[in-house]
Amino acid sequence: MKQLFTNIKELLQVRENAVNKLSGAEMKELPTIKNAWLLIEDDKITDYGEMDSLPKINIDKTINAEGKIILPSWCDSHTHIVYAGNRELEFADRINGLSYEEIANRGGGILNSAKTLQDTPEEVVYQQSAKRLEEVMKLGTGAVEIKSGYGLTEEGELKMLRVIKRLQQNYNIPIKATFLGAHAIPKEYKEKPNAYMDLVIEKILPKVAEENLAEYIDIFCEKGYFSVADTHKLLSAAKKFGLKPKIHVNQFNAIGGIQAGIAHEALSVDHLEVMRPEDIESLKGTATMPVALPSCSLFLSIPYTPAREILDAGLPLALATDFNPGSTPSGNMNLVVSLACIKMKMTPEEAINAATINGAYAMELSETHGSITRGKQANFIVTREIPSYTFLPYAFGTNSIESVFINGKTVE
Ligand SMILES: N=CN[C@@H](CCC(=O)O)C(=O)O
Ligand SMILES: [Zn+2]
C-alpha cells in the first residue's frame, strides 16, 4: 500500500546518505525539509521532497499533515520494560529520606523486584510488560532494547528472556534482547559473590545462548554490585557465544567500567553520570556509543551525564529511558529529550539526533532506523500542529504527538 503525507510543515532528520551515528559537532546539524511530502510503500520509506516538486504518483491514501512535523520515531536503546509489580513503596521511602543505596542495602531495590518477578507467573509478567510496551509505542518509540536482570536465578532470567521473545513475536516493533543476569548479587550469594558469577557464566549464559534468547550481554559494573574483574570475566565468556556488550557503568562511581567495556568492544556504555577526564579520553576513537539516561537522574536526584563535555570532546551520545521499576518508572522518550535540553544543555538538534540515529546505532539498527532515508523502515512520529521542532523539548510534559507509524502502520 502506498501512503502519501503532504504539506508537512517540516520533515526532520532527512539523511540522503545514510549515516551510522553522529559525533561531536555533527550532532548540531539536523537536516530538514520544510513544506515537504513523504511517500511510504508498505513498511518502507520510498521517497520525499518539497511540495513544489511533488510528482504525479498513484497512491492508495493521502494524509494531509499541514502544520504538523514528521520525524523518525524514538530509538530507545536501554530499557528494563519486562518486570513484575512496582516499587512505589520505595519511592515513598526515598521521599522520607532513605537513599537508593540504603534501600538496596536493606534488601530492597533490584532484589525486591527479583523476588516479585520470581513469584509472578510468566503469563502475568508478559501481560504487564506488553502493556508498558504498548504505552511507549504510543509515546513515539519505534525501536527498543529490553534487558533481563530481575530474575537472578536460572529460572527467573530465562522467564524474563522468554517474555521478551514473546513480545518480539507479537509486536510490530524491533525489540533487541539483552541478558543482564549480573544485575545484582542475590541475598543467598552475599558472602560468596564469585559463586553467583560462576552460576551466571557457567549455567545461565550457555542456556541463554543455546535457546537464542539474547543478542547482547550486560552487567552492572558498580561498587557493591559487580567489579571490573567480574566485567572482564563475563564479557570474555559471552563473546564465545557471540553476545556483544552493552553495559551499565559509572552510575554512582567511576571504577573503570568504561575501559573494560571498550576492551571488549562494547556496542554501548550506559549511565555515565560520574565521568572522570580519563573516561572521556578512553572513548575517543572507539566504536562504543556512550548512552545517557536523564530520566534516571531526575528520578533519583543524581548527577546528569555531562553531555557537553562528551560532545565537546568530539564523541557521540545517545539518549534512552532506562524504563525500570526502581530508578526510572517512565518510558517516555519525549521527556528524555526535554531533560537532555533542560538539564544537560544539549541543543534540540543534538537531543533529537541522540534519541533517533544514535539510539538506533546503540541497537545496531542504524541501517534501517533512526532517520528519514529512502529504503529505511517507515517508523515515524506525526506531531500535532506545533510552531517548530524546538517546541517538542520546550513544552515538556505536553503531548505533542498526534500519531505514530511503525513499519508503515499506525500504532492504535
Ligand atoms: N542501575 C542498575 N539498574 C537499573 C536500576 C534497577 C532498579 O533499581 O531496579 C538502572 O539502570 O538504573
Ligand atoms: Zn538500566
Image (tube, rainbow, N blue to C red):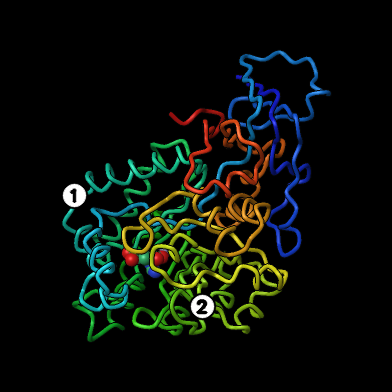
The residue that appears at 29% across and 74% down in the rendered structure is 199
Height in image: 6 above or below 134? above
Q: Which residue is mark 1?
A: 121
Drawn side of residue 274 relative to residue 55, left or right: left
Q: Nearer the viewer, residue 118 or 26?
A: 26
Label pair 1/2, CB-CB below 8 angstroms? no
Q: How many marks?
A: 2
What SS does tag 2 mark?
A: loop
Q: Establish whether ligand 1 lies closer than 8 Å to the Cβ of label 2.
A: no
Is residue 180 visible in the rendered image? The answer is: no
**Residue designated by label 2:** 274
Q: Amino acid at mark 2?
A: Val
Disc 1 marks which amino acid? Pro
Q: Is tag 1's residue or tag 2's residue first in the polypeptide sequence?
A: 1
User: Callout 2 environment at 10 Å: few (<14), some (14 to 19), or many (20+)?
Assistant: some
* Residue at image point 23% right, 44% down: 123
Please identify the quarter of the rendering in which residue 53 is found.
top right
Between disc 1 and disc 2, the foreground one is 2
The percent coordinates of residue 125 (x first, y second) are 25, 48
Can you say which quadrant of the picture contains the N terminus?
A: top right
Q: Quadrant of the C terminus?
A: top left
Q: What is the spatial separation of the Cα atoms under label 1 and label 2, in whole angstroms?
A: 37 Å
The spot of residue 116 in percent (x, y) is 20, 59
Q: Does 232 sit left or right of 41 as displayed?
A: left
Q: Say above or below: 171 vs 317.
A: above
Residue found farthest to the left: 119
Instruction: Name the residue: 63% across, 50% down.
Output: 352
- Badge 1 element: loop
Q: Please name the residue shown 49% across and 62% down the image.
A: 293
